[in-house]
Each structure stands twice: as structure tokens, then as C-alpha cells.
Amino acid sequence: MIRETRRYLRRLALAAAMGLPFLSAPVGATAQEIEGLQGNAAGAIEAQIRSANLRYPQVHIFYGDLTGRGTSDAVSFVYYDAGGSAERLATWIWLDADGEYELARTVPNEEVFGYEPRGVSFAPGRVTVTTTVPQANDAHCCPTGERTFVLELGANEAPENSPATAARSSGNWVATAQNSPAGVTVTGTARDGRTTFSGGCNPRMGKGFMGSLYGYGGDALQRVDDQSEPVSFKVAGRSGTSSFAGQMHYFAPDEAWVITGSLPTDFLDAFARGNTLSIQNGRGEEAVAFDLGGSSKAVQAMRQVCGM
């Protein structure tokens, strides 16, 4: 009983540290592959999905020009499981800001609903989309109707007017900043294409950099539940390699390796300037490596929001 209580409190603390809702089981997007991610906005959309911890998401992304200046803006329709028999829909409009994607608007379900989004067209300030919707006599499983929606961007929805959440994509690392509660979620994918890092900062939890590894399939890190082991975080760049000692513990219910405590703010300086990040076990064996494209943007967001 004591051990189960410790597990519960540890997961609750990790959820609070990331500014995410606490779930009793690892059913959110952090522990699964996301279907439908494609194109330049995929990183920002993935970060938004993981930040919201949506269950079993399926994504439809469309690109076009919302500004009239030749930008490659995007709209994403994310269907996810909210319990019960029906899927829920999260619709986000994204603006292309010199290759980075910023969340411009979350469209409420009163303005768009249905399945199989298609026929999407872009014009300055608006997106038009057609979906399949139920008709009066349709069975619950099988809608047969069709409806076209016009989604307005709206001048007051531009990202520079401080939305509740803003995601930025630049290279391999994506930072998602939110205002209430304040915090930044940072995600990256390892060179093996399978292991992901999800972490970030929360001002209420101090100024350290926290996070976890998911999807790791190697044997350089142990798999004993709730047990810690020494690791090294090595950042290589033009000026050489910087090494930071730490510990990670395995949390079996989430199949995650969690940084024990947090990494110091000095790590962020190297992380922002480096080219690669390698995580090694206590024997010096490399477990996983990450390219650090986009890390400087992630660090900038953490410093602005968390005061690091």
C-alpha cells in the first residue's frame, strides 16, 4: 500500500510539474504514436496534442495561405477519445511565422463539427472545410450528411495577442508555452526515430529543467520500477562537450525514464548552443542521442515564461 501511494504521489507531482492534468493510467498521447502528422507544422501540432494529453489522437492537417503573403499556414483537425462512444474534435488554426508555427486560434465545436474533413481551402483570414455530419434518420454509427463550414481567423485571435497557449516549432525541438497556469512543455525525438523526450519547466516547481523519456527500446537503461541510476547528459557543440551528472528513475506504469529532480539552469546554456545531446548510463554507454535543432527556441521560451 505504501508503494502504491508513493507511485500515485510521484505521478501527481510529475503532472503538476509539467502543468498537465493528472491521469490514473498512461493513456494519453505521451505514450503512443500519433497518426496523421505531416508537413512543417507537425512538430507544433504534436507538442500541442501532448501538452493537452489527448487520448488516441488522429490528425488531419491542411496547408494554405491565410495572410495573402504566400505563407504556408495550417489548420489541424484532431479527433480524440474523451470516453463514451463518441470522438471529440479539437480544431486549431496555425500561422506560419518564418518557418515556425504559432497557434492562432482554437475553434470551438459550435463552429465546426463532423468527420472526414475535406475540400479545405484558404483565403486571407478564413478557412473553408467540408465534413460528414449526421442527418435526422442516420444511425449513430453512420452519418451520411455533408456540411461546409467557414472558420474565421479573426484579428483578435492573432498569436501576438497572447493566446492561452502558443506552440513554436523549429527543427527537432518544440516548445509549447501556456499562460494559465504558466509553464513550458518541451518535446524532442531521438535519432532512433522512436524515443521521445517530454519535459519543460514550471515556475511553481523552481527553475530546473524536468522531463522524461518515452519509447526507449534499448538496454542501456534499467527497467526496475521506481529505482534510480546515475546518468550523464552530454552536450556536444562547436566549443566542445559539456557533461552534466544526474539521475533517472524508471516508472513502470508509464514505461518512462524520469529525470530525478531537475537539471540545473547551466544545462540550458549548453543545450541552447549545442548540436547533439547524448544520455549515457553510469558505465558510459550511450542510451539515446538527440539532434538539437530548435533547442535555442525552446530555451528562449523557458527563460521567458519560467524565469530561468
Image (cartoon, rainbow, N blue to C red):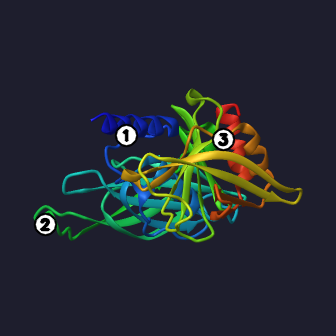
User: Would you name the residue on which mark 1 appears?
Assistant: 7
Q: In this view, does 184 lie above or below 41?
A: above
- Which of 129/191 is in front? 191
Q: Which amino acid does label 3 sit on?
A: Leu
| Residue 123, visible in the rendered structure | no
Q: In which quarter of the image is residue 259?
A: top right
Q: How far apart are marks 1 and 2 (CA)?
A: 46 Å
Give the secondary structure at mark 2.
loop
10 Å neighbourhood of mark 1: few (<14), some, or many (≥20)?
Answer: some
* Residue positioned 54% across, 42% down in the render: 165
Q: In which quarter of the image is residue 260?
A: top right
User: Would you name the residue on which mark 3 appears?
Assistant: 263
Q: Distance between the residues labelled 1 and 3?
A: 22 Å
10 Å neighbourhood of mark 3: few (<14), some, or many (≥20)?
Answer: some
User: Would you name the residue on which mark 2 appears?
Assistant: 138
Q: In this view, does 207 lie above or below 287?
A: above
